Amino acid sequence: MKKSKIAIASDHAGREMKEELKSFLQSMGVEVVDMGVNDDKSVDYPDYGIPLAQRVSNGDVPRGVLVCGTGIGMSILANKFKGVRAALVSDVYTARMAKEHNDANILVIGGRIVGKGLAREMLKTWIEATFEGGRHQTRLDKITELEKKCHK
Ligand code: RB5
């Protein structure tokens, strides 16, 4: 269940990293839903990030990974969706905290920022970490309350 299914998407700047992380996830036995992009032609990251964030938001897939050049654009857009908690990470500690404290359901990586080895390690750490609940759930509940006001 924990490793069940992960959707992954990128723009052109993150495509190489997406392919790397897709293979890595598959080698871990994760079912990967590849939502593009599939060549190096310049594209607009929202065209790939929005459909993925939508699927996580509506519960179609439990988790996702988004990659663009810096990871900034993808994280901005993903966090507009109800129920999405997207975390842009560039170190292993933050990747672990993203799950343990924030229950992040989308991991965002800057394909031009981190190396492939670090990206693999961050992804593995996030997948294997467990949300701690308790006071962290109380905090997330406050964000959910905010969402109810924003997403009418
Ligand atoms: C594309 O050049 C780049 O702007 C994009 O990948 C991303 O970094 C945006 O946040």
Image: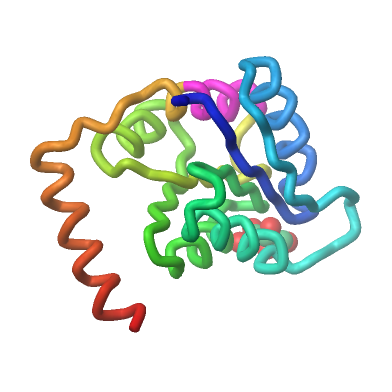
Residue ID at (63%, 43%): 7
Coloring basis for residues: rainbow
Residue ID at (18%, 56%): 141
Apparent side of residue 9 relative to residue 39 in the rendered image (left or right): left
Apparent side of residue 50 relative to residue 126 in the rendered image (left or right): right
- When asked about the image quadrant of residue 144, the answer is bottom left
Q: In the image, residue 21 lies at what x, y percent?
A: 68, 30
Q: In the image, residue 138 lies at what x, y percent?
A: 11, 50
Instruction: Establish if 37 lies above or below 146.
Output: above
Splitting the image into four quadrants, where does ligand 1 fall? bottom right
Numbered label tally: 0
- When asked about the image quadrant of residue 133, the answer is top left
- Judge by depth and name the residue closer to the eye, 54 or 8: 54
Query: Residue at the bottom extreme?
Result: 152
**Which region is colored magenta?**
116-124
Instruction: Establish if 25 lies above or below 136.
Output: above
Q: Assess whether residue 80 is covered by the magenta stretch.
A: no
Q: Quadrant of the C terminus?
A: bottom left
Apparent side of residue 9 relative to residue 102 in the rendered image (left or right): right
Residue ID at (56%, 62%): 54
Q: Assess whether residue 121 is covered by the magenta stretch.
A: yes
Residue ID at (70%, 41%): 33
Q: In the image, residue 80 lies at what x, y percent?
A: 44, 69
Instruction: Establish if 115 lies above or below 28.
Output: below
How would you classify the magenta stretch by its main secondary structure? helix
